[in-house]
Amino acid sequence: MVGTGAFLLMVTACAGQDMPTSQPAGGSSAAPTGSVSTSPSASASQPVLPTSPSADPPGKPRLTVPEGSTPVPANKIDASALPAGFPHEVWTANGGTILNIRAQEGGCGHALGEAAEQAADHVVIDLSETKAQTGQMCTMDIRYPVLSVALAAPLDQRTVVLKTTPPK
């Protein structure tokens, strides 16, 4: 009974406060791009939270593909060196100078990606994963983050060759 009373008190106290919310990507809103408001008539006293790319830096793995990215056609992706079941989705951004690549990681590991080779007709992207510390307990889950890899020149008609290396 006491627990229920405490819970109701907490819910009542929180109900009167405006909580900041975020909008799904691509949603229509009267708020300017790169911001989120808590109500249609946001005033100067209400905070506006940034949702710009700076909130999710290019080198940091993310869960979703950055807005405005363009898929690389399947015939321009060579994923033959990847293990069976490994994702092979690639997008370009920033005029083709950034590749956004769906990677795979699990447990305590974190996916890494780097441009290992940049030739006139292809770009080799090396996907790897950090190694878990010895003696550390880790979950057995698999995640599929999106990594951003910078290129020296736009991808244009070059083929993206994806390969993996052992954990680092």
Image (spheres, grey):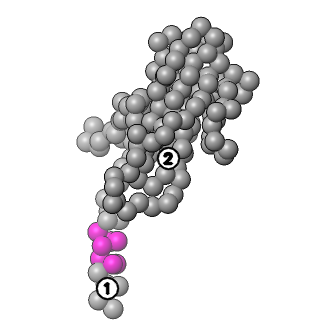
Is residue 49 within the magenta segment? no
Residue indicated by mark 1: 3
Q: Position of residue 51 (x, y in %)?
A: 40, 36
Q: Amino acid at mark 2?
A: Glu
Q: Amino acid at mark 1?
A: Gly
Question: Which residue, as the protein is rendered here, is positioned at the far right?
Answer: 75
Q: Position of residue 130 (x, y in %)?
A: 41, 43
Count of number-bearing discs? 2
Residue nearest the viewer, comparing 98 with 128: 128
Residue positioned 49% across, 22% down in the render:
116
Which element is circle 2 on? strand
Q: Residues within 10 Å of mark 1 (few under 14, many from 20)?
A: few
Q: Residues within 10 Å of mark 2 (few under 14, many from 20)?
A: some
- Any part of residue 27 in sight: yes
The C terminus: image quadrant: top left
Mark number displayed over residue 23: none
Image height of 61 relative to 53, above or below: below
Q: CA distance from mark 1 to mark 2?
A: 41 Å
Residue positioned 52% across, 18% down in the render:
117
What's drawn in magenta, residue-wise?
7-13
Indicate left or right for 50 with 67 as reference.
Answer: left
Is residue 8 within the magenta segment? yes
Q: Position of residue 147 (x, y in %)?
A: 48, 34
Residue indicated by mark 2: 105
- Among numbered discs 1 and 2, the one appearing first in the sequence: 1
Of circles 1 and 2, which is in front?
2
The N terminus: image quadrant: bottom left
Residue nearest the viewer, comparing 163 with 13: 163
Quarter of image, res 59:
top left
